[in-house]
Image: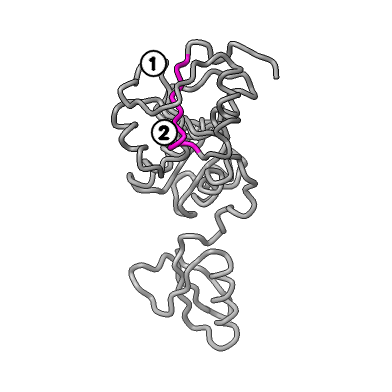
Amino acid sequence: MLKTNTFKGANVFMSRNLVPPEIFDTLLDALKLNGAEVFPCCDPSRNGRNDYHVISSPDHEKFEDLRAKGCNLLGPQCVLSCAKEHKQLPKQGFTCCLAMDGLKVLASGFDTDEKVKIEKLVKAMGGELCSKASLDVSFVIVKDVLAAKYKWALNVLKKPGVTASWLYQCWTEHRVVPQDLHRVLPLCGLRICVTGIVGEERKKIETLITQNGGKYSPELTKQCTHLICEISLSLIIIC
């Protein structure tokens, strides 16, 4: 394999206790062949700008300790991708992989805690979570069709909104997965009640509601967003 200086100046700490044994040697070769100085240990005191620590995942028992000490943390996939694409090692706290490198993501409809979690995942995959809508947004993650940016994504950006499950799948597979199975269904987030319609027709409507992501409510409550009723033999929806 051709040697490069892509990682020259980088001090990489990689303990066998923090990295899966089956990829340790592969990572070691990738780092050394690209000019990094590798230390086969874990030293949390080394948290300088050019110091890096390779760790298997944020679920590792040492992860929070290293992050609290201000260490630059890298996932195995990040190291291998940087070596393959001849990119410098990122300095942003923790980078799991480069699946979203250069991509901009917008999240809408989520509470503060959910948004913080989404931002951590996006950034850890090399992406950027945008605070405002713009035409250069790559993906729009929405909680449901009531989210403020759901219609904007469809009508202006001309892209379908996806659920947070899409992001979690990208995280699991270390790649941008297809959106088809994660598109927000047209009634997602809606609670719909039906009145004045009985029998098989009512059951069909209930089935359609659930198949399209909505929730059927047998009674009209304050939580209902829509009421379907029959007036003069015609179905209308009251919003």
Q: How has the structure been colored for display? A: one colour
Tally of marks = 2
Which residue is rendered at x = 35% and y = 73% of the image?
A: 221
Query: Which of 41 and 224 lies nearest the eye of the viewer?
Result: 41
Circles 2 and 1: CB atoms closer than 8 Å: no
Instruction: Note whether 111 is above or below 186 in the view shown.
Output: above
Q: Callout 2: few (<14), some (14-19), or many (20+) C-alpha neighbours within 10 Å?
A: few
Residue 49 image label: 1
Query: Which of 231 and 196 lies nearest the eye of the viewer?
Result: 196
Q: Amino acid at mark 1?
A: Arg
Residue 96 location, x and y as percent?
A: 49, 35
What range is drawn magenta here? Answer: 10-19
Residue 137 seen from this side: no
| Residue 69 included in the magenta stretch of the image | no
Which residue is rendered at x = 54% and y = 18% of the image?
A: 88
Which residue is rendered at x = 56% and y = 59% of the image?
A: 186
Viewport quadrant of the C terminus: bottom left
Q: Amino acid at mark 2?
A: Ser
Q: Callout 1: few (<14), some (14-19), or many (20+) C-alpha neighbours within 10 Å?
A: few
| Residue 12 included in the magenta stretch of the image | yes
In the rendered image, the residue lying farthest to the right is 1
Which residue is rendered at x = 58% and y = 53% of the image?
A: 182
Residue at label 2? 131
In the rendered image, the residue lying farthest to the bottom is 199
**Does dot 2 land on a helix, a strand or a loop?**
loop
